[in-house]
Image (cartoon, grey):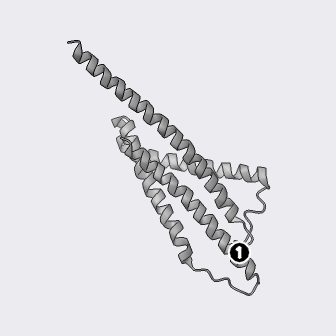
Amino acid sequence: MHAPRIVIGLAMIHSVLCCVTAAKIEGTRLQAFREHKSDNEVVHMSTRWLLFQFFLLAGLDSLFESGVVSLYRNQAPESLEGYLKYISKGVSGLGYMFSVIFVNRIMQINDGSKDWFQTTLNMSRLDKYYWLLAMISSANLAAYIFVACFYWRKEADHKKRMDDGDQAGAGSL
């Protein structure tokens, strides 16, 4: 019963690591661009730098989907069984939309979002964007751990009360 919540937590850890990795790689790319800043010079960076980030992203996606569907399967009524995969996709889609809205608001509050996204990749500051996503993912992970721990205690207390009730009922016969 605890496995879906652990899998979802692992997916959220993948999310944080993926955002941190993307921020560091983008920072390295921008540094290489600044060192070789010339309109005619091409800055060479291998696409292999992106592999670890994409492995983390693939892990995040597969773990999250399987964990959420499994959690819903344990918690939802049987009449919704055929729709759980779609509900899972809908929930993650809402998460994506709310994160875009949240990042937009944060950028407007901090520095007007003019610096982060420019017409060229080399003029943009995607590293700041990835660091913000890492902070949001970390906050989500902390909130998730708190709620998951609270829910486990509640579930354990309920099971203990049920076991105690069964023993008390058996003793009174």
Q: Residue 41, image x and y in percent?
A: 72, 87
Q: Identify the residue at image location x=40%, y=41%.
A: 72
Tell me where residue 102 appears, x and y as whole percent.
Answer: 67, 48
Which quadrant of the rendered structure holds the N terminus? top left
- Image coordinates of residue 166 in percent, x first then y, are 27, 21
Q: Give the labeled residue for mark 1.
A: 31
Mark 1 lies on a secondary structure that is: helix
User: Is 61 rendered above or below residue 95?
Assistant: below
Q: Residue 75 occupies which quadrant of the picture?
A: top left
Q: Residue drawn at (58%, 65%), measured in percent from left and top? A: 21
Residue 97 in sight: no
Is 131 rendered above or below residue 91?
Answer: below
Q: Residue at x 30, y 25 (%)?
A: 163
Say which amino acid is labelled 1. Gln
Seen from this angle, which residue lies furthest top? 172
Q: Quadrant of residue 81?
A: top left
Q: Position of residue 130 (x, y in %)?
A: 64, 60
- Front residue of 59/13: it is 13
Question: Is 145 on the left or on the right of 110, as rendered?
Answer: left
Residue 27, quarter of the rendered image: bottom right
